[in-house]
Amino acid sequence: MNELTIAVTGLNAIDSPGPGVGVIRALRESTDFQARIIGLSYENLEPGIYMHELVDRSYQVPYPSAGSEVLKARLQYIHEREHIDVLIPNFDTELANYIKISEEIRRWGIHTFLP
């Protein structure tokens, strides 16, 4: 069975959880592939990054207000270490930056769910 390394954003697992938690749970339920989950978090205190049944590794990424170039540098750093196959951004506010760097992400061999 293939193992995919999937990076997911939106890990705040509070009373009103971020969408990433549900996405990760759905990925873990799949019988079509094995998933190695990389959690991407804006805060080092987001509960989702400490839920080891959800994420295999976690990294902090810059807030969307930092811009696309800072995000690109950070994603490249993470990809060099984790060899990401799929990236799933989950917040509307981060989509613009991911779209701006989508060509680079594609060149790195990372698949996404971007418009």
Image (cartoon, rainbow, N blue to C red):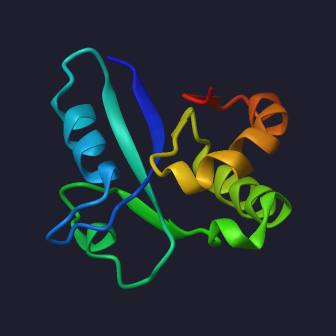
In which image quadrant can residue 25 be found? Answer: top left
Closest to the observer: 16 or 71? 16
Q: Residue at x 81, y 43 (%)?
A: 100
Q: Position of residue 33 (x, y in %)?
A: 31, 21
Question: Residue visible at 23% across and 61% down?
Answer: 17
Q: Residue at x 14, y 70 (%)?
A: 15
Q: Indicate the position of residue 11 as horizontal and vertical percent values.
A: 34, 61
Marks counted in the figure total 0
**Image quarter of the C terminus:** top right
Residue 95's place in the image compared with 67, above or below, is above
Q: Residue at x 84, y 38 (%)?
A: 104
Percent of width and height locating residue 1: 32, 17
Looking at the image, is 45 positioned above or below residue 75? below
Q: Taking 4 as reference, is 50 left or right?
A: left
Residue 50 left/right relative to 101 = left
Using the image as rendered, state which of residue 101 and residue 77 is in the foreground.
101
